[in-house]
Image (tube, helix red, strand yellow):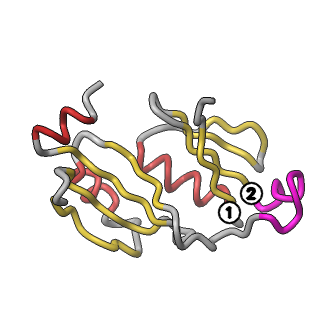
Amino acid sequence: MDFVSTRIITGDIARLVDFYERATGVRADWSTEDFAELRTAGATLAIGSTRTVALFAPGSARPADNNSVIIEFLVADVDLVYRNLADVVADFVTEPTTMPWGNRSLLLRDPDGNLVNFFTPVTPAAMEKFAR
């Protein structure tokens, strides 16, 4: 088995794709007007419009209704990400904070309210864990 992507369903795909392109610096590949993917070396973030839900099972996913999943991005400088997003993020849950496990983390909500964590390993153990 290979874990390949996480998909977000949204009522405004253009807005959400624009947010993630800006936040990650990765350009989205659009398959259709209802589906785009942002591919990184480690994972893919897929974004689908609500119109795609009916293709799987009508009503099986609802946009802007996540209260349990955190989407995480490993970044070189979490403080720089914070500065770059300061004018577009309405809800910073926490500003950059060094966590007990050695990551400096920035937790925010995307335009649909999904929790997003950008983090940079800052202790030797955390840096070793995420060394590539």
Q: Residues within 10 Å of mark 2 (few under 14, many from 20)?
A: some
Relative height, residue 44 to residue 64 (above, below): above
Give left or right: position of 107 versus 35: left
Is 94 rendered above or below residue 99? below
The magenta region covers: 50-60
Q: Which residue is mark 2?
A: 49
For the point 67% across and 43% down, which residue is it?
Answer: 36
Q: Main secondary structure of the magenta part?
A: helix
Along the line of sight, the residue nearer the viewer: 85 or 76: 76
Category of crowding for the residue at label 1, using alpha-carbon neighbours closer than 10 angstroms: few (below 14), some (14–19), many (at least 20): many
55 drawn magenta? yes
Amino acid at dot 1: Thr
Is 107 colored magenta in this rendering?
A: no
Count of numbered badges drawn on the protein:
2
Residue appearing at x 50%, y 56% in the figure: 19
| Whole-number angstrom distance, CA of label 2 to CA of label 1 | 5 Å
Q: Quadrant of the C terminus?
A: top left
In terms of secondary structure, where does tag 2 sit? strand
- Quarter of the view holding residue 15: bottom right
Q: Tell which of 51 and 18 is nearer to you.
A: 51
Q: Amino acid at mark 2?
A: Ser
Q: Which mark is residue 10?
A: 1
Residue at 46% across / 65% down in the picture? Answer: 115
**Residue 64 screen position, x and y as percent:** 62, 71
Residue in the image at 73% along x and 46% along y: 35
Q: Residue furthest top?
A: 132
State if disc 1 and disc 2 touch (CB < 8 Å).
Answer: yes
Find residue 4 and report its horizontal and vertical position in percent: 60, 35
